[in-house]
Image (cartoon, helix red, strand yellow):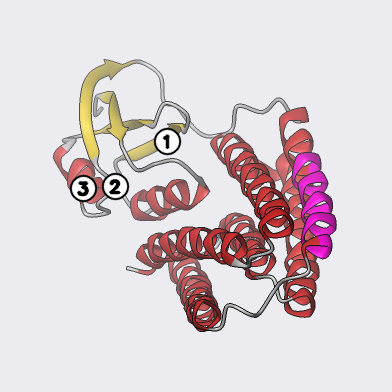
Amino acid sequence: MNKTYRSTFYIKEMDCPSEENLIRMKLQDTASVYGLDFDIPGRKLVVTHDGDIDHIAGALASLNLGSELQSTEESTEINREEDPVRQRKVLWTVLIVNFMFFLIEMSTGIISRSMGLAADSLDMLADALVYGMSLLAVGAAAARKKRVALISGYLQILLAIAGLAEVIRRFLRLEIMPAFETMIVVSLLALIANSFCLWLLQRTRSNEAHIRASIIFSANDVIINIGVIIAALLVWQLQSNIPDLVIGIIVFLIVIRGAFRILQLAK
């Protein structure tokens, strides 16, 4: 009988569900891997496995997330992951809320001429796609998971590039002023929605990695919502669209960064 080991990796760039899904899908077909235990806040991953760790370390290194093997020790227990069925209802709720606010923020962003709202709507879409991938990945074949990742990643990149192009156009036409009142009202509603999602996820009191990662993702969304509200107040005080364009650029770049990482799932 093969010996069982627990190897701990420090993964520098692992800070949201995108990286967690990336790692899960990379290692899902590795027969020697029995379980994955993610510590997103600590950026650590414990792999329960048998055999040589070199193959697993090489697979993680290929993701370019800054993985570093910290320790390997023999284990008498096989750490098998929890059945995710009981968390599906929460994940579906969070997905629906995020997708609804993608539609609301995109439409009001266009109407109010706010790039901050438009960019935040894409961040909401990115969240919904990540949660959707988590749900679709359960019990699915590897090929299906990769197709979902490919479509999601390219869609986010195309939308974010279009948004950045519009930001550049507006920098050249500074007379385009967003409706700061709409920015504040919609961002406050999005803040409430994301806070609700955060509360809902925390209420599960689950130690499962997907839930812990989703909590961090929702917390980041709350910060972005606050950033858009601050930008709206600055638009009002300064009578300039520059704060709106700056927050738009920041969020668009966040979306593009996440999209490129999701595309790695298709490799």
Q: Give the range drawn in magenta.
A: 181-196
Helix, strand or loop at mark 2: loop
Residue 218 vs residue 141, the one in the foreground: 218
Query: Of the residues shown, which amino acid type is indicated by label 3?
Result: Ala
* Quarter-of-image position of residue 99: bottom right
Give SS at disc 3.
helix
**Rendered location of residue 174, percent (x, y):** 58, 77
Which percent across, then down, holds residue 186? 82, 59
Determine the CA span between mark 2 and mark 1.
16 Å
- Quadrant location, the N terminus: top left
| Main SS class of the magenta portion in the image | helix
**Which numbered dot is residue 263?**
none
Kind of residue sitting beneath label 1: Leu
Q: Position of residue 179 (x, y in %)?
A: 78, 69
Mark 1 vs 3, N-terminal side: 1
Gap between marks 3 and 2 measured at Cα: 7 Å
**Residue type, numbered disc 2:** Leu
Quadrant (top left, top right, bottom left, bottom right) of the C terminus: bottom left
At horizontal 49% and vertical 66% (from top left) the residue drawn is 145
Category of crowding for the residue at label 2, using alpha-carbon neighbours closer than 10 angstroms: few (below 14), some (14–19), many (at least 20): some
**Towards the viewer: 27 or 102:** 102
* Residue 243 belongs to magenta span: no
Q: Which mark is residue 61?
A: 3
Check residue 36 in the rendering and tell me which mark sits there, or answer none: 1
**Looking at the image, residue 67 lies above or below residue 42:** below
- Residue 139 seen by the camera: no
Q: Residue 65 carries which label?
A: 2
Mark 1 residue element: strand
